[in-house]
């Protein structure tokens, strides 16, 4: 019985290490996503700030107006590209999270099996101890039997 508990314990320890590794990967993916969202926010803020400054300026000449529109167009492209990057990072983070959750669920199942085996081992050990205790009077009776 103890061999079974030892084997399950070893498998559980390996599963715990794997779950931790996948958890770290999921955490890194989440932090990378947060960084990309921050960049998108900064880009949007810059675009909004630039557009509001240009809108309040009344001294823009036609040449500057064309440059302004071109630059805003490039900012819009950069925002759209960053939105796609954020979307891709969200998908990666979701995949890593799902993998981690699967490993976590497996680990919890193994831990329940290990606890059940440990409980069975304790019951078995208790029965064996009780049997040994029950055998003591018989052994003593045999030693002191009047047949000798």
Image: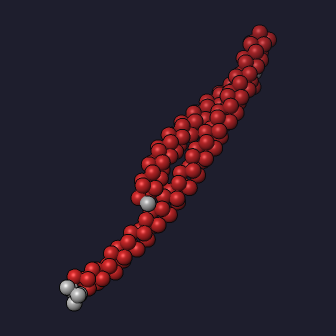
Q: Is residue 121 above or below residue 103?
A: below
Q: Is residue 46 left or right of residue 68?
A: left
The picture places residue 24, in percent across and down from the top left corner, at: 51, 40
Q: Quadrant of the C terminus?
A: bottom left
Q: Residue at x 53, y 54 (%)?
A: 110
Of residue 112 and residue 61, the one placed in the foreground of this image is 112
Q: Residue at x 52, y 59 (%)?
A: 113
Q: Is residue 44 left or right of residue 114?
A: right
One can see residue 131 in this view? yes
Q: Quadrant of the N terminus?
A: bottom left
In which quadrant of the rendered view does residue 88 lie? top right
In which quadrant of the rendered view does residue 95 lie? top right
Q: Residue at x 56, y 40 (%)?
A: 26
Q: Residue at x 56, y 55 (%)?
A: 109
One can see residue 56 in this view? no
Q: Residue furthest bottom?
A: 146
Of residue 61 and residue 69, the one placed in the foreground of this image is 69
Of residue 92 and residue 54, the one placed in the foreground of this image is 92
The picture places residue 139, in percent across and down from the top left corner, at: 27, 80
- Judging from the image, the colouring scheme is secondary structure
Q: Is residue 54 left or right of residue 2?
A: right
């Amino acid at each position: 019985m103890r061999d079974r508990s030892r084997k399950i314990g070893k498998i559980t320890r390996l599963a715990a290490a794997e779950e931790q590794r996948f958890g770290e990967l999921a955490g890194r993916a989440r932090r990378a996503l947060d960084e990309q969202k921050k960049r998108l926010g900064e880009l949007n803020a810059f675009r909004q700030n630039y557009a509001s400054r240009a809108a309040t300026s009344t001294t823009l000449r036609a040449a500057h107006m064309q440059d302004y529109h071109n630059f805003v167009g490039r900012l819009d492209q950069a925002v759209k590209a960053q939105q796609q990057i954020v979307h891709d990072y969200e998908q990666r983070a979701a995949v890593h999270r799902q993998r981690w959750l699967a490993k976590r669920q497996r680990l919890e199942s193994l831990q329940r099996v290990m606890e059940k085996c440990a409980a069975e081992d304790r019951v078995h050990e208790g029965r064996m101890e009780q049997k040994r205790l029950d055998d003591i009077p018989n052994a003593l009776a045999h030693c002191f039997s009047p047949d000798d």
